[in-house]
Image (tube, rainbow, N blue to C red):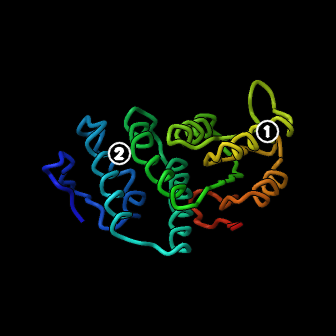
Amino acid sequence: MGLNSERGYFYKHKNEPKNIIDIFDKMDDYISEMRAKNDLETIPKYLRQYAWEYFREIKLEEEKLKSLAVFVVDKTYRNIAESTISDIYNKSFFANVLPFFWDTFQNKGIDLFYIVDNTFHDDGKFKLIVDLFTISGFAVAHPYGNSILKYSEVEKNIKDYLASFRMIMYIERDDRVNYLNKIIDIAKESKYLTIFRNKDSKNAHVEIFDN
């Protein structure tokens, strides 16, 4: 699969993806090259076009498409959790590449509800996860503000997101609060494909609730 230079999208990349999951397995490489070349547009445009051609040419069965959606959202989280730099380049990547995937999954009938329970000792890491998922187009809910939000406030936020058919992430950062069981119940009652992560980011295990 290649790009048509006459359309202005061609970019010969040393890590040109060989398949769709390379975009996520090699995410750090792409963002590093964006930094090295001071490039906020060309590489994201190239990867977005690659993904567009992939979904145009490859017709995935529903279960394989769901498996891909689970991989994409969870690998995205794991990449952020393992990253060490927050700058305009990773923000550009998340703003310009990831929305295409969320739109594609939703257009194919897959809405994602991603629930994360992990311990973050670094305030900056938690904020980076929230910021980058938000930039990518997810509606991110969590119980933290100037004080811990009541469950009813969190529930209202999530139900508003459900009503507007947003891709949803709910994340808790420590044991100061635990609304997880109630949030999972909301997700199970929805028509969303729900992914629950409560392992360290180096561990690929997640639980899936397919409604």
Residue 128, which numbered label?
none
Q: In this figure, which residue is indicated by the disc labeled 1?
A: 154
Measured as percent of width and height from the top left, residue 3 is found at: 21, 57
Left or right: residue 161 compared with residue 184: left
Nearest to the observer: residue 114 or residue 161: 161
Residue at 83 percent across and 42 percent down: it is 177
Measured as percent of width and height from the top left, residue 198 is found at: 70, 58
Relative to 25, does residue 94 appear above or below in the rendering? Answer: above
Residue 195 visible to an observer of this rendering: no
Nearest to the observer: residue 94 or residue 155: 155
Residue 73 visible to an observer of this rendering: yes
Measured as percent of width and height from the top left, residue 63 is found at: 56, 74
Q: What residue type is labelled 1?
A: Val
Figure disc tally: 2
Instruction: Classify the position of the N terminus by image quarter.
Output: bottom left
Q: Which callout, 2 or 1, points to the residue nearer the camera? A: 1
Nearest to the observer: residue 91 or residue 80: 91
